[in-house]
Amino acid sequence: MALSRRSRPSSINIWPGFVDALAQLLMVIIFILLVFTVGQFYLSGAVSDRDLEIKKLTQQLNDLTDMLSLEKRASDDLRLNVATLGAQAQQASRDKDALAAKLAQATSDAQQARDALAAGDATIATLNANVLALREQLQELAKALDLAQSQNKEQQVQIDDLGNKLNLALAAKVEELAKYRSEFFGRLKQILGDRPDIRVVGDRFVFQSEVLFDPGMADLEPGARQRLEPVVSALKQIEAGIPDNINWILEVDGHTDVRPIATAQFRSNWELSTARAVSVVKFLIDQGIPAGHLAAAGFGEWQPLDKGSSEDAYRKNRRIELRLTQH
């Protein structure tokens, strides 16, 4: 038994120590956990407070940011208002300058108006004086008019008497000229006889143009001078007996038919009719008829004797007329 106890090694019971170590370790762990839990609790509270503080700070920061944004917008609006006010101030300054210029112009116009009014007053005074003077002149003229009217009545009687005498004298001269015209036509008819190329129309002798001129020409043909000789002879016979106080005129009028003419020499019937009348007047002057008692006129186609369109009508309208009248 002794040998068996000797042969078994002695064992150390470490379990209690191990248990104690584990217990202590567990206690340490529990303590640590406890400390950690407490620390965590306090840390969580601190973190929570810090989060709240951060949230507050963040909110404040956001509020400050919003306020800063508002202030920025307000600053921008203020700058815009300042710019607008500056522009308005400039415009107001310009308006002020313009109003000042208008005021100066209005002042000048008012001064001119006052000057014009003063001048108008002076003019009115002058006009009043002139009106007064004119009234006095009118009174004098009225007196002179009354006197002139009384004299005019006497003169009117004299004028009426002179008018009657003048009318009688004119009538006498007209009758005297009519007598010489009748004598001239009578002698001319006697000399010409019943020639078919010469007609009497009213108080005029009418020569057909064909007996004096070639067609379209204004120079007297050689035979025309012979045909006009009776006119010269009759006119010379009565010329010496016409008193000097009768201003007689032998009118020579040229006429054409309605058909137009357009030549190098004559562009119209006016020119042809006038040139033919002048040719007859020149012939009469060459024969000794005083130029102061002759007149030439051209009527073209505008005073026809026959308004027809036949050859006979054209022939009648192409003519030279002689008329003894008084100037």
Image: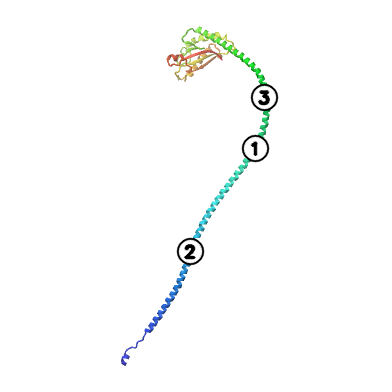
Q: Residues within 10 Å of mark 1 (few under 14, many from 20)?
A: few
Q: Is residue 71 left or right of residue 22?
A: right
The answer to whether 133 is drawn above or below residue 1 in the figure is above
- In which quarter of the view is residue 12 placed? bottom left
For marks 3 and 2 on the same chain, the one whose residue lies earlier in the sequence: 2
Question: Dot 2 corresponds to which residue?
Answer: 59
Q: Residues within 10 Å of mark 3 (few under 14, many from 20)?
A: few
Q: Amino acid at mark 3?
A: Ala
Question: Dot 1 corresponds to which residue?
Answer: 117
The answer to whether 52 is drawn above or below residue 242 in the figure is below
Residue visible at 52% across and 55% down in the picture:
77
Mark 3 vs mark 1, foreground winner is: 3
Residue visible at 65% across and 18% down in the picture:
153
Secondary element at image label 3: helix
Q: Nearer the viewer, residue 34 or 250?
A: 34
Percent from the top left, x then y, of residue 233? 53, 8
Residue visible at 38% across and 82% down in the picture:
19
For marks 1 and 2 on the same chain, the one whose residue lies earlier in the sequence: 2
Compute the Cα span from label 3 to label 2. Answer: 114 Å
In the rendered structure, find residue 142 and report the number of the disc placed on it: 3
